[in-house]
Amino acid sequence: MVRKMAYIGSSYLIGLFFASFLNIGANILAAASVVVVAVTSLILFGRKSIKPSVCMISAAAAILLYGLYDCFVYRNIVKYDGCQVEVKGVITDYTEYGGDKTAYTVKGVINGDVTAEVSFFTDSTYAEIGDSVTVTGIASKLKNSYTFPAEDYYKAKGMYLRINRVSGFDYVPRESFSAKRALYNYRDKIIDVIGNEMDTDGKAVMEAMIFGDKSELESTQKTLLYRAGIGHLMAVSGVHLSVVCSFFWLFISRLPINKYFRFGFLLVPIFCFAAMAGFSNSVIRAAIMTIIVYGASLFRRRADVFNSLGISVIILTIATPFAVRDASFLLSVGGVFAIGVAAPEVIKAIEQKYELGTFIKSVITSVCVTVMIFPITILFFDEVSIASPMSNLLLMPLCMLILVGGIIVALTGGVPFIAAPVLKICEILCEIVLAVSKFIGRLHFSYIPLGSDFIKLSAAFSVILVAVLFIVTKKSAVTAFASLAIVVFAVLSVNLYRITSTDISTAVFRDGSSTAVVVHNGNSAAIIDFDGGGAASSAVKYLNRSGIYKIDSLILNSGANASLPVYLNDLELFDLSAVMLPERDKSLAVGDCCFYEDSQYFDTAGCTLYFYNESVIKVKCRDNDIIFYTDASEYDFTGEYAAAVRYDGNSPDIDPDCKIIAVMSEKGEAVAVIDRTVHIGENVKITVKGNGEVTSETL
């Protein structure tokens, strides 16, 4: 079988991904069924079926592995959810925050029973990586929120519990040498050097590119970089490691030693760089592939990207199968496959008829990457860049220079006479990258929002169509051109759908004690914030996913002194027409603000808003009333408003003439009542369609 590990690894990855959507029983049944089909195929068709049978058995093994890990490892750890626990272990990572708080990650034993990795917050101490610790508190499973899917994110990285309400924390400093601690301290030293020589924005970009640390990047900057299609450079991967290895290989290859010692010396910078980057899935994948590529000659084998990728996938997921749902892992695998396998095949097929230049080959490679990672992007992100094929050609050389400059500084220890001039050049390049990203990111046709079911269905249909075309035609060039045509069609369809949609939706968001409501049609929106701006990030995320960039009105109904700065910062990339404050907050005006009084009403975003007081707002669209209030008192609306609402913590009394009522209680519970069906405790979206039909969904 040609490319044995390529086919085995691909089948294994497909099986593992398929298993991640099933429970243990379904996984065992699926694995058994696939094995039966593989064995039957071997019996009936003999040697002719060896290749597909091996692939099926590989997929079955992955499905079974996922199910067994879920049953015997994951569930054995999360059984401590809600329990008092004591964890004894070693600090593997930590992050310092404001307010003298530190987040620690500890790998240890829970209650002397099961080994696991847990995280917790505590007061800042002098504890460092490698120190032995004992921590006690209440364990809890990580939970997804609308703004951040914490459970899914950390589950893919092998962390399933967090310790809340820490009641005890003791640590014993490690006296022996710790290589990981030394590397982390060295990284902090280089970060300090970068911070001393570059401005804030440049430092944030450099840290993200060299170490994969995006904490210093503002949310607006991250959005712009991803819209420009270069966000992938913020995750340390093969590009970064190849630069490091190439730099070292220039010296190692000239040493008067045999090839085995050369290879051994090369493993040192690979390990050190992977450690400083936090041993993320993408950098481990890159390290494995790099080792395979450089080590192939030792065994007189020809390095093959597809084979190396297959081996990397198996090694990375054999101990942590949940990594198959990690966004960085899948994007890394998809990107490498596109660059190292798909693009060369497409270029080879086209060159049989046409002569291609370097620029056209680069464009084809960029398009292949965009098409390959498009389905993955839909699963994990709010937007997908369609400008990336061209923006990568423009910005990638600049980013590579920044990356090389950062690595030179890191490898030379940050000595001033080298770091100062190199980082000044990098600062100028960072400013150019951010400026170009800002220009591209503000072009609303340069990205596709991924919030609607229509977009997801279009993407699923596109992927299936491309797969069918490849199977039927078996021609890479045909499939590539079809993929490009489908992407263009999808972009046009999505924008046409968004512009022509007559649906009017009202989305309610709750974050702690803060409530925000977004009312929108296909083109514009109004944001109503009740108290303090705490739900601003949820509202902005929702607008981005919905592809809405025009804000008719930002209405701060209460707590404007806290919420106004938050919204002005978060809405930087939106076209904001008006900020509206209550008359009582007139002294808080910043810039051009309008003011309204209680009991006033006005039209915005396809609806009419009625204000009664700081706690009650009614949205009226197509003769449907949506009423919001933020306390548990009783309100009685009669006559024109045709609704009587009372919420006492149990169930609301609904006037039959009021078709929709959305209630936000003082306890933070969201209640949507449609056809007398009640949904409690979740963020709610209510849509009044063009035909008058009303639907509700949780966000």
Image (cartoon, helix red, strand yellow):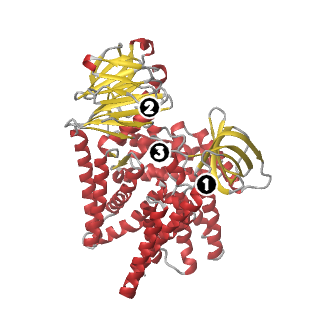
Distance from Cα at disc 3 to Cα at disc 1? 47 Å
Q: Can you tell which of label 3 and label 1 is closer to the viewer?
A: 1
Q: Residues within 10 Å of mark 3 (few under 14, many from 20)?
A: some
Label 1 sits on residue:
77
Q: Is residue 605 above or below residue 610?
A: below
Q: Can you tell which of label 2 and label 1 is closer to the viewer?
A: 1
Quadrant of image for the N terminus: bottom left
Name the residue furthest left: 691
Label 2 sits on residue:
536
Quadrant of image for the C terminus: top left
Label 3 sits on residue:
429
Is residue 622 in sight in this rendering? yes
- The residue drawn where x is 79% and y is 55% is 176
Distance from Cα at disc 3 to Cα at disc 2? 32 Å
**What is the x, y in percent for residue 69?**
55, 63
Of pointers 3 and 2, the one earlier in the residue sequence: 3
Please state if 55 lies on the left or on the right of 293 as rendered: left
Q: Can you tell which of label 3 and label 2 is closer to the viewer?
A: 2
The amino acid type, in three-letter code, at marker 1 is Ile
Question: Label 2's element?
Answer: helix
Of pointers 2 and 1, the one earlier in the residue sequence: 1
**What is the x, y in percent for residue 230?**
42, 50
The amino acid type, in three-letter code, at marker 3 is Leu
- The residue drawn where x is 39% and y is 12% is 583
Is residue 273 in sight in this rendering? no
Question: Label 3's element?
Answer: helix
Question: Label 1's element?
Answer: helix
- The residue drawn where x is 30% and y is 49% is 455
Please state if 421 lies on the left or on the right of 592 as rendered: right
The amino acid type, in three-letter code, at marker 2 is Ala
**What is the x, y in percent for residue 329?**
49, 58
Front-most of 393 and 64?
A: 64
